């Protein structure tokens, strides 16, 4: 199995995390959620001897896509997003590839799989590669993404979290914001400190109120 290259980067004023991900044997990588300043992401990739070959988006909110335009100004690389959130990216994004649930794509020799996890937005997705799960604004370490925004759906969020909770406990969660006590954690640990992920029924989930 290809070893994973993974770099977590704190970006912007809203405690966002962006990620560089690829296979260890490659010089290529994908950037997940390039919110805010593209330059710092390009510099980080260059420091690691990597070239960003694609962008993957967990959803279309501005704090996750803000750097896309500048990245595309450097190179016409593909932008991967769930089909339901593609429209949110706007006219300026000409290289979008719409993903469906279960679709996979190559990230510098590493296979990333799309899990459609609606709730925060209709087209939110998580990306899974070799036991590493990039959750965007679906799952944080001790809470979950807001479901009171336009397009949000609390019942769908509960179903999505149940789906994530069923993954192996050793799966490591890499969230879209640094909101929790740790920047990442295994699902088994998150289940013990995150009542939103642990809520078994929709009623229990809705009582928590997000
Ligand atoms: Fe968001």
Image (tube, rainbow, N blue to C red):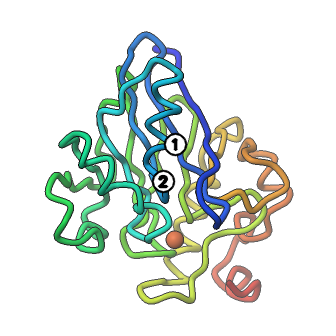
* 96 left or right, relative to 120: left
Callout 1 secondary element: helix
In this image, 38 relative to 132: left or right?
Answer: left
Outermost top residue = 25
Q: Badge 1: few (under 14), some or many (20 or more) residues near its Cα, within 10 Å?
A: some
Q: Residue under label 2, please give it.
A: 37
Residue 83 picture location, percent across and down? 25, 63
Q: Which numbered tag is attached to residue 190?
A: none
The image quadrant where one finds the C terminus is: bottom right
Q: In the picture shown, does residue 86 fall above or below 80?
A: below
Image spot of residue 184 (x, y percent): 72, 45
Is residue 148 visible to the viewer in this orientation of the structure? yes
Give the left or right position of residue 207, taking residue 62 as reference. Answer: right
| Residue at the (68%, 86%) spot, across then down | 206
Residue 38 place in picture, x, y as percent: 43, 48
Q: Closer to the camera, 162 or 46?
A: 46
Label 2, ligand 1: CB separation under 8 Å: no
Q: How many numbered callouts?
A: 2
Residue 126 place in picture, x, y as percent: 47, 53
Label 1 sits on residue: 40
Q: Residue at x 20, y 55 (%)?
A: 96
Q: In the rendered image, which quarter is residue 118 located in?
A: bottom left
Determine if residue 1 is in view.
Answer: no
Mark pair 1, 2: CA separation = 6 Å
The residue sitting at 78% across, 62% down in the picture is 142
At mark 2, the secondary structure is: loop
Q: Is residue 190 left or right of residue 99?
A: right
- Quick check: marks 1 and 2 in contact, CB under 8 Å? yes
* Label 2 CA crowd tier, 10 Å (few <14, some 14–19, many 20+): some
Q: Residue at x 65, y 46 (%)?
A: 173
């Amino acid at each position: 199995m290809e070893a994973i290259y993974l770099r977590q980067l704190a970006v912007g004023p809203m405690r966002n995390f962006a990620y560089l991900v690829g296979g260890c044997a490659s010089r290529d990588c994908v950037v997940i959620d390039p919110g805010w300043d593209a330059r710092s992401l390009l510099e980080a990739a260059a420091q690691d001897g990597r070239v960003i070959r694609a962008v993957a988006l967990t959803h279309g909110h501005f704090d996750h896509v803000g750097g896309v335009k500048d990245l595309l100004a450097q190179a016409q690389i593909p932008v991967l997003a769930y089909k339901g959130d593609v429209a949110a990216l706007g006219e300026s994004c000409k290289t979008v590839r719409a993903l469906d649930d279960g679709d996979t794509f190559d990230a510098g020799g590493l296979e990333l799989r799309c899990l459609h996890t609606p709730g925060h937005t209709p087209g939110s997705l998580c990306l899974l590669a070799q036991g590493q799960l990039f959750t965007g604004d679906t799952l944080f370490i001790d809470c979950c993404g807001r479901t009171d925004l336009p397009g949000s759906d609390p019942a769908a969020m509960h179903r999505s979290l149940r789906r994530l909770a069923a993954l192996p406990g050793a799966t490591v969660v890499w969230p879209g914001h640094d909101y929790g006590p740790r920047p990442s954690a295994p699902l088994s640990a998150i289940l013990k400190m995150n009542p939103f992920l642990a809520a078994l029924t929709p009623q229990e989930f809705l009582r928590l109120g997000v």
